[in-house]
Each structure stands twice: as structure tokens, then as C-alpha cells.
Image (spheres, helix red, strand yellow):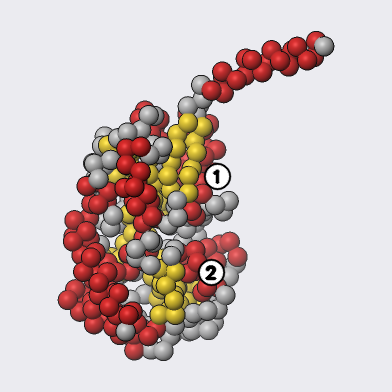
Amino acid sequence: MRTTLLAAGLSVIAIPALAETPVLTVLTYDSFTSEWGPGPAIETAFEATCACDLRFVPAGDGAALLARIQLEGAASEADVVLGLDSNLTADAAATGLFAPHGQTVANTLPVDFADPLFLPFDWGWFAFVHDRSKLPQAPTSFDALAASDLKIVIQDPRSSTPGLGLLMWVKAAHGDRAAEVWAALADNIVTVTPGWSEAYGLFLEGEADMVLSYTTSPAYHLIAESDDTKAAALFDEGHYLQIEVAGKLAASDQPELADQFLAFMQTDAFQSVIPQTNWMYPAVTPTAGLPEGFDTFRPAKSLLLSPLDAQAARDPALAEWQAALAR
């Protein structure tokens, strides 16, 4: 009886305590929350500092995050959105749903980047990844790829930030020739997937010779699997950058926790997790540096459209892409 009464008493005490634990909800892309992604380690590290419950909510691929926030508006339960990229920030800012972060951080990106609403947490160069045991000499340009009979898998630019990044890559590298490049590439494309994970899975299953991914993707195989057969094809025209960002929603009911999380995002505790979970470059190089082999495929030239230029280029580029694939 005493045990029962004691347990009942503890329950009465415990329930209000749990109810007072603040919850920070971070909307992000699926792979970020996977057991092999950065989410679990970052959740543990942040909760050790915040006396809060950090909850990552997966919402498809990166481009799908913006669509969800636009749909939910100020009624969204999310406090922070993590996983937009610089090709989408102009549209995200135009929603009026994001609040200034008010933070100054010295990042180590290869280009200047400063935005009053969005803070970078990682970055990478897009690249076509191949298996050099099957394809020893990869193409060195879009034109060479289009002239070959190689089969590629890419992602849908309407749902995936890598897919949208490829449109921007072709546009930034070839400008008015973009439609011509897409027309030439159309017969190389085996399929278009909704997101990165599906495309990379098809490549690993041998369904294509190359897949749109990142210059750092081979580092995963090298470090995690001791497999040096995967390589990133380096293109003469340069490689487009993806800069992934996070922003605080203005309607958040946990604005101080959201600020705390954005500040934590720039620390070693967060940034040191990125290279071997998200397999991207951290926005701030960790004190311990990058893993060995991480920098094997480094393009000589970086390409990047400003957020406003990317916003202006998106619809014409999408129309060119759709016209080429419809033939």
C-alpha cells in the first residue's frame, strides 16, 4: 500500500514537471532525421544545453519544406525550418513568415553569404557521382555527358533541392544555352526521382551510370565503407554550390529557444556532426578539421546565383527542363 501511495504521489509530482518542459519543433528534410543522419546526435547535444525537448519533424525533401510552410502559414506548429537552400530563400522571405535571426557568425563558406533571415548550417558542390571501376573516364562537362550514351538519375526540381540545384547549375554555367543543354541531356536521363535518397539508391543498385549528388558523396563510401570506387566527375564549367540554411518562424511560441538553437547550430557541437552524417561541408569548419579524404574532389570553380537571381531563373529553367523531358 505504501508503495502504491508513494508511486501515486510521484505521478502527481511528475506530470506537472513534464508538462513544463518546453518543446522546440524543427521542421526538416527526411534524411536529416534518419538514424544515420545528423538529427539524433544533434538532438542529444542540444537537449543537454537547453532543458527542453527538441523535436525534429521530417517533411520530405528540402523543397517540400517551403511548400508545407506556405500551406500552414502562421498556424504552423514549427518553430524553426532547417533545410531550405539559397535557391529558395527569396521565396521563403517573401512569405513574411520568417523572423530576423539577429546573429553574426563568421562562417567558412567558399563564398560571401549573409542573410538577415537565414543562417547557413552546411554547404556542398553538386556533382555527378560514378563508380570508377565501371566508368574509369567520366565526362568533364555537360556537353560531353550529353554526347555520351551514359545513363543518369536526377531529382525532381519541384520537390528536391538537388533537383532545383541542377537547374541552377545548368543555367549558371550555360545561360542562354541552357535549353539546348537540356535537350541534349534528355536521352541520358533514366528517371527523375522525388528526392535524393531514391536517386542515390537506384545508382547503388546499378540502374544508372551516374547520379546527381555531391562532390563529398564519395567520402561516405571511403570513410564508412572503405570503398574507393566512387568518384565525383569534375566539370570544366565549374560546379554549383548548395548552401543549406535554417530560419526562425515569426509565429513561433518558443522564440528564445529558437534563437538558442540557431546559435547552437554554429557551434562545434553541431558542426562537427555534419561531415560524417550529412556528408556535406560544415558551415563553420570544426576545431578538429575535416575527415581525411573529405576534400578529394574539389572543383576549381564555384558557381552560385544570388537568391533573387535564382528566384528569377527558376520558372524559365523549369520550363526548359520540362520541354526537354517531354520530347
Looking at the image, residue 109 lies above or below residue 23: below
Judging from the image, what secondary structure is the residue with disc 2 in?
helix
Give the residue at x 36% y 56%.
63
Discs 1/2, front: 2
* Of the pair 17 and 323, the residue shown nearer to us: 323
Q: What is the C-alpha distance between the residues marked 1 and 2?
A: 22 Å
Q: How many residues crowd around disc 2 within 10 Å: few (fewer than 14), some, or many (20 or more)?
A: few
Looking at the image, residue 145 lies above or below residue 170: below
* Of the pair 126 and 111, the residue shown nearer to us: 126
Q: How many marks?
A: 2
Kind of residue at badge 2: Gly
Judging from the image, what secondary structure is the residue with disc 1 in?
helix
* Of the pair 255 and 15, the residue shown nearer to us: 15
Percent position of residue 144, x then y = 33, 85
According to the picture, the residue beneath numbered tag 1 turns out to be 40
Q: Earlier in the sequence, mark 1 or mark 2?
A: 1
Contact, CB < 8 Å: mark 1 with mark 2?
no
Dividing the image into 4 quarters, which one contains the C terminus? bottom left
Q: Is residue 177 left or right of residue 238?
A: left
Percent position of residue 296, x then y = 44, 67
Give the residue at x 35% y 37%.
75
Dividing the image into 4 quarters, which one contains the N terminus? top right
Looking at the image, residue 249 lies above or below residue 169: above
Kind of residue at badge 1: Pro
Q: Is residue 121 visible?
A: no
Percent position of residue 146, x then y = 34, 85
According to the picture, the residue beneath numbered tag 2 turns out to be 201
Give the residue at x 49% y 63%.
197
Q: Is residue 302 left or right of residue 224?
A: left
Q: Is residue 111 visible?
A: yes
